[in-house]
Image: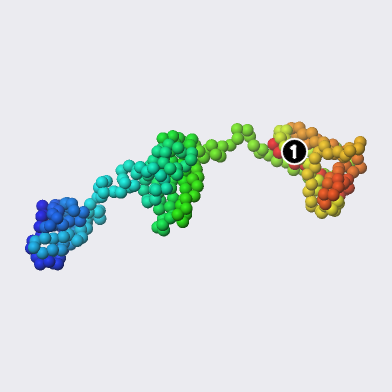
């Protein structure tokens, strides 16, 4: 046990290297140690002590050979926000420094979390910039982790927003429909529009289509439409007179069965200008059919 280092004039330094275990005993006058606590030395440790005169010394530096700190800070010496339990607060707007906080019914908590919240604060180096992340640890489940976060920007708090944290939450968010989605598609080649004609188009989907449409594609300028323009067709569109200007589509598991209106102008569409509903010129357009299953 080392309790003193002898009497030397004030200011003199002693450089110490320990060859084995020894205990330096703290004394507020004769041997002042870092942390005001005894130090158990080990072989290879080094220290620098300064004489204060009259046989009194202060150890200015102590370096362990292991690289470990001289002393461990006790729980009692930690600030409450960094202690063994979270610091209890009554208002989340007062939780500003790095650390762990908790409160039941605290002001400025997320509106959805009315009971206990526990969380962390991450403070930026500049004043007025920090992040708070909290959750209701009493009611949190895998299906709802009750985690909320908000940011302070320039001293102004933003709104709380919910965070999904668990796999169960992610699975629920991106769940696949139990009903199979459309997996296959068919598009016909351009078909000539023949008044009163029929078409039998093998779609190759293997099942009856769930969705199907007809469009006409402009191949020669007509009704102010340009070559390449495409117009969706209401299959049962008709005029106000007795003539039939429409198409019908009847799908089955193999084909799209199409019948074209008998009028010499088989379809009527709105002119591109929108000014009128006008007969098409059959030869200026081609029919295309699409189906999905």
- In the figure, is residue 202 to the left or right of 89? right
Q: Horizontal and vertical percent for residue 43?
A: 17, 55
Q: How is the image coloured?
A: rainbow
The residue positioned 50% from the left and 43% from the top of the image is 162
The residue positioned 79% from the left and 47% from the top of the image is 231
From the viewer's side, name the closer residue of 21 and 224. 224
- In the figure, is residue 179 to the left or right of 128? right
Q: Horizontal and vertical percent for residue 66?
A: 23, 54
From the viewer's side, name the closer residue of 25 and 153. 153
The residue positioned 91% from the left and 40% from the top of the image is 263
- In the figure, is residue 184 to the left or right of 287? left
Asked whether residue 169 is in view, the answer is yes
Q: Tell me the quarter of the image containing the C terminus.
A: top right
Circle 1 is placed at which residue position?
212
* SS for dot 1: strand
Q: Horizontal and vertical percent for residue 51?
A: 13, 64
The residue positioned 16% from the left and 62% from the top of the image is 49
From the viewer's side, name the closer residue of 11 and 157. 157
Q: Horizontal and vertical percent for residue 289?
A: 77, 42
Q: Disc count in the image?
A: 1
């Amino acid at each position: 046990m080392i309790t003193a280092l002898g009497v030397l004039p004030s200011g003199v330094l002693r450089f110490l290297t320990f060859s084995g275990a020894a205990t330096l005993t703290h004394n507020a006058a004769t041997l002042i140690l870092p942390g005001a606590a005894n130090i158990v030395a080990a072989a290879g440790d080094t220290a620098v002590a300064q004489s204060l005169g009259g046989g009194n010394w202060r150890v200015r530096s102590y370096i362990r050979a292991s690289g470990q700190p001289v002393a461990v800070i006790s729980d009692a010496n930690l600030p409450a926000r960094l202690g063994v339990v979270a610091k209890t607060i009554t208002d989340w707007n007062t939780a500003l420094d790095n650390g762990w906080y908790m409160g039941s019914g605290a002001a400025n908590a997320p509106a959805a979390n009315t009971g206990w919240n526990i969380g962390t604060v991450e403070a930026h180096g500049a004043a007025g910039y920090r992040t708070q992340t909290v959750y209701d640890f009493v009611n949190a489940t895998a299906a709802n982790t009750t985690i909320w976060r908000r940011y302070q920007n320039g001293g102004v708090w933003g709104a709380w927003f919910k965070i999904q944290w668990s796999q169960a939450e992610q699975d629920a968010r991106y769940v696949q429909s139990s009903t199979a989605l459309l997996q296959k598609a068919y598009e016909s080649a351009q078909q000539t529009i023949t008044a009163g004609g029929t078409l039998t188009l093998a779609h190759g989907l293997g099942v009856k289509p769930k969705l199907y449409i007809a469009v006409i594609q402009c191949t020669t300028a007509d009704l102010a439409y340009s070559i390449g323009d495409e117009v969706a067709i209401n299959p049962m569109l008709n005029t106000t007179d007795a003539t039939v200007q429409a198409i019908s589509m009847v799908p089955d598991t193999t084909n799209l069965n199409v019948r074209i209106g008998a009028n010499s102008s088989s379809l009527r569409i709105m002119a591109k200008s929108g000014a009128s509903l006008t007969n098409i010129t059959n030869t200026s357009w081609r029919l295309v059919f699409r189906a999905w299953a």
